[in-house]
């Protein structure tokens, strides 16, 4: 049985801002085992990004408990959590979060800055990663000089270049045509599976149905369906 890499128990999330309170997630419990590809589906506004950010320790739940790689997120200090994220996780943001004044290569290299690797080794890893994603000729381009799908692939390269054990992808095929979306998903899943890593994807898209080991549907902040693939090793 594979070890548990992320576990959320009884998560709720309520945002309180400007005198208004918004209940977004209610009583979510999810267990993700190392090496799984997990997809969380749901329509816009249903809480997918909020849930993914809580699972990655980027957002705190209002109540409930999150454990990542055997460590309780609520017991970690901000620097400990940042270190856990840098060493263990890659996050592909829905809006990419690329630094606009940095080239594609510099954006990807950012994920390696905290490692002890030398500059030449880091840059070779960046070139190899961008090459895997078909972007070797765009290494010196700024995000504004790239198409949306290319920016998305730079964000994927940045999330994967340090070979994290745990990869979160928020709508990784957001604004691209179906053919490019399929290619991005196939590439992402292949890279993650080759590394033996775990992938958690939130999406409206249908591309991961049939590929994922676990499939959740989120509706109005609640898990309304959980399916496990038949050949899951649990
Ligand atoms: N900081 C915030 N303050 C108040 N409400 C918020 C905040 N962030 C998110 N929400 C609310 O939480 C709900 C869920 O947002 P979330 O971004 O998680 O949805 P989503 O499922 O990822 O949607 P999409 O598919 O459009 O990306 C929304 O209704 C939104 O208004
Ligand atoms: Mg979202």
Image (tube, helix red, strand yellow):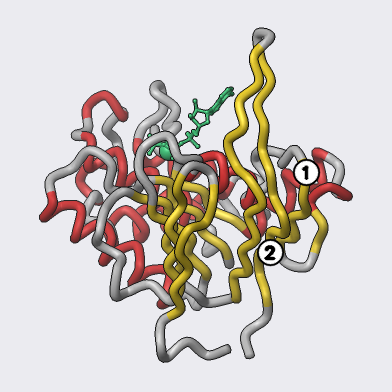
Task: Please rate how many residues cluster around mark 2, counting C-alpha atoms within 10 Å: few if below 14, some from 14 to 19, many from 20.
Answer: some
- Judged left or right of residue 124, residue 143 is left
Query: At 60% across and 75% down in the image, what residue appears?
Result: 33
Query: At 62% across and 32% down in the image, what residue appears?
Result: 23
Ligand 2 visible in quadrant:
top left
Which residue matches tag 2? 7
Element type at marker 2? strand
Task: Please rate how many residues cluster around mark 1, counting C-alpha atoms within 10 Å: few if below 14, some from 14 to 19, many from 20.
Answer: some
As drawn, 112 above or below 144:
below
Q: Confirm whether residue 125 shows in the render.
A: no
As drawn, 16 above or below 36:
above
Spatial CA distance of label 1 from label 2 is 14 Å
Identify the mark at residue 205; answer none if there is no mark.
Answer: none
Residue 75 in the image, given as x and y percentages of width and height:
88, 50
Residue 224 in the image, given as x and y percentages of width and height:
48, 58
Which residue matches tag 1? 63
Query: At 42% across and 67% down in the image, what residue appears?
Result: 215
Q: Are marks 1 and 2 in contact (CB under 8 Å)?
A: no
Residue 93 in the image, given as x and y percentages of width and height:
45, 40
Instruction: Say which label, 1 or 2, has the lower sequence index.
Output: 2
**Residue nearest the viewer, comparing 96 with 161:** 96
Q: Confirm whether residue 228 shows in the render.
A: yes
Quarter that holds the N terminus: bottom right
The image quadrant that residue 10 belongs to is bottom right
Query: At 63% across and 45% down in the image, what residue appears?
Result: 26
| Mark in front: 1 vs 2 | 1
**Residue nearest the viewer, comparing 154 with 65:** 65
**Residue nearest the viewer, comparing 114 with 159:** 159
The image quadrant that residue 127 belongs to is bottom left
Quarter that holds the C terminus: bottom right
């Amino acid at each position: 049985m594979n070890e548990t890499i992320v576990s959320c128990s009884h998560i709720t999330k309520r945002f309180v801002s400007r005198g208004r309170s918004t209940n977004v997630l209610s009583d979510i419990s999810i267990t993700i085992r190392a090496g799984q590809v997990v997809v969380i589906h749901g329509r816009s506004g249903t809480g997918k990004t909020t849930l993914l950010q809580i699972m990655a320790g980027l957002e705190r739940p209002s109540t409930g408990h999150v454990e990542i790689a055997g460590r309780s997120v609520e017991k970690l200090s901000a620097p400990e959590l940042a270190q856990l994220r840098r060493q263990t996780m890659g996050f592909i943001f829905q809006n990419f979060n690329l630094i606009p004044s940095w080239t594609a290569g510099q954006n990807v290299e950012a994920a390696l800055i905290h490692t002890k690797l030398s500059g030449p080794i880091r840059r070779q890893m960046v070139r190899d990663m961008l090459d895997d994603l078909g972007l070797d000729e765009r290494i010196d381009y700024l995000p504004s000089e790239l198409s949306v799908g290319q920016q998305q692939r730079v964000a994927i390269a940045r999330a994967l270049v340090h070979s994290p054990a745990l990869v979160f992808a928020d709508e990784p095929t957001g604004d691209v045509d179906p053919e490019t979306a399929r290619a991005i998903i196939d590439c992402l899943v292949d890279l993650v599976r080759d590394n033996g890593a775990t992938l958690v994807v939130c999406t409206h898209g249908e591309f991961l149905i049939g590929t994922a080991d676990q499939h959740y549907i989120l509706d109005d902040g609640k898990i309304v369906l959980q399916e496990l693939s038949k050949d899951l090793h649990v």
